[in-house]
Amino acid sequence: MAPLEACELFSGLEPAALAAVRKAAEQRKYLRGQEIFSEGDPGDGLYVIAEGAVEICGVIADAHKYRLARYGPGDFFGELALVDDKPRAATAVALRDSIIYFIPREVMLRLLEETPGMALKLLRLVGQRLRDFDREHARQLVQNERLAAVGQLARAVLHDLKNPLAILSLTLDSSYTAQTDTATRRAAEARIRRQLHRISELVNDIMEFTQPQQPIHKLEPVNYPAFIEQTVGDIQPELVLRNVQLVVANRPPNVMVAMKPTRLKRVLFNLCDNAADAMPEGGRITLYFGRTEGEVITEIQDTGPGIPPEILDRLFEPFATFGKAHGTGLGLSICHRIIEDHHGRIWGHNLPGGGAVFAFALPIWK
Ligand code: ADP
């Protein structure tokens, strides 16, 4: 059994003062699992563990219990109520059968008044505990946020995968019997290809999003009009299938841009994909190009209903999605990251006469 002076707070105390504390200290026995005090109880004194172990825990959201600290022989607890004279802010429970010294508040206050060295020691120990608690709390916050983000991503992905998989399975069941004619089979193949495309886009988005945030390794100077011409050619077939017309309003300025073409292509794909999503009955996407002294500007306008006001101020945040049954909210955050990696800027707004505009500016390579 640890004597009182094994507790750091009492070590070095004058023999007379120590004797007084010993006299005032009451030895209490607690069984394993027994509550020593609980949140809201009056802060009636200080506890020092002679034998056993004690856990201090708090409760959040009325149900979730979390551990604040664990103490053993020679440790003290319940010191905060001693200092601030407020009800207990946490609950103390014996983890094993324990013997604990209880020193009433008045005795401790008198002792602290008479022994400034002890008051200073208490202050230092309490400060250290608060600091440890802060550090642990910050660590847990980060951990919880990470877990929540992973859960959110997993739910969005599974949700997005379910639909194309269901369509694939139905199409295969119904269209590949011995009686299926060529036309039905062709239509089924187109449907299967579209769903596979959807799945592979989703996989690309997730891979892109979960990549560690590192800048693109190497940007190479590429002729911008040539890049746009090729990208438009790649995007067009998918848009035609969705009854969306892609119009290039003017020729891009004949400049070079330092880029990683596959990644930049992804930005145009995502923006056109979003525009097409906003126009389920079909419509028009128009690309406009401009330049300033140092930047080339690309604008993507659509004839859809415009960006919902609910999402306007968090468009580029991950998981920000609105009004879509299958939105992951990753598309625009990926665009934002890619454009930033290219040292550019991206923004979006609504046109006064209806429709949405997304635009990005990229530095001209000199
Ligand atoms: P997701 O498309 O998966 O929802 P995004 O980050 O690509 O995620 O887009 C976020 C949201 O921005 C969309 O859910 C939609 O509400 C809005 N949005 C994006 N582009 C357009 C557009 N061209 N027209 C209208 N709303 C848009």
Image (spheres, grey):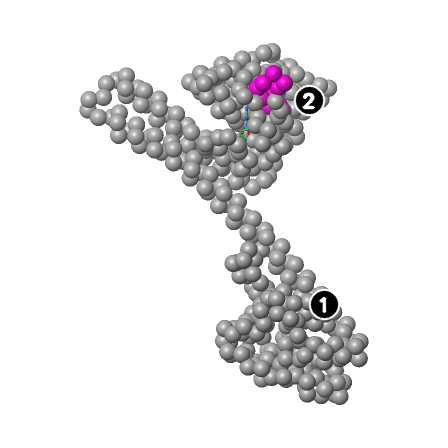
Q: Which corner quadrant holds the N terminus?
A: bottom right
In the image, 148: left or right of 81? left
Q: Which stretch is magenta?
A: 351-360
Q: What residue type is labelled 1?
A: Asp
Distance of label 2 from label 1 (alpha carbons): 61 Å
Secondary structure state at the residue bearing disc 1 = helix
In the image, 168: left or right of 234? left
In the image, 131: left or right of 156? right
Q: Which corner quadrant holds the C terminus?
A: top right
Residue appearing at x 70%, y 72% in the figure: 82
Q: For mark 2, what is the residue?
A: 295
Q: In which quarter of the image is ligand 1?
A: top right
Q: Which of 207 and 244 is in front in this view?
A: 244
Q: Which of 319 and 268 is in front in this view?
A: 319
Residue 354 lies in the magenta stretch: yes
Q: How crowded is mark 2: few (under 14 residues within 10 Å), some or many (20 or more)?
A: some
Relative to 159, residue 198 above or below: above
Q: What residue type is labelled 2?
A: Glu
Residue appearing at x 59%, y 51% in the figure: 142
Residue appearing at x 45%, y 18% in the figure: 281
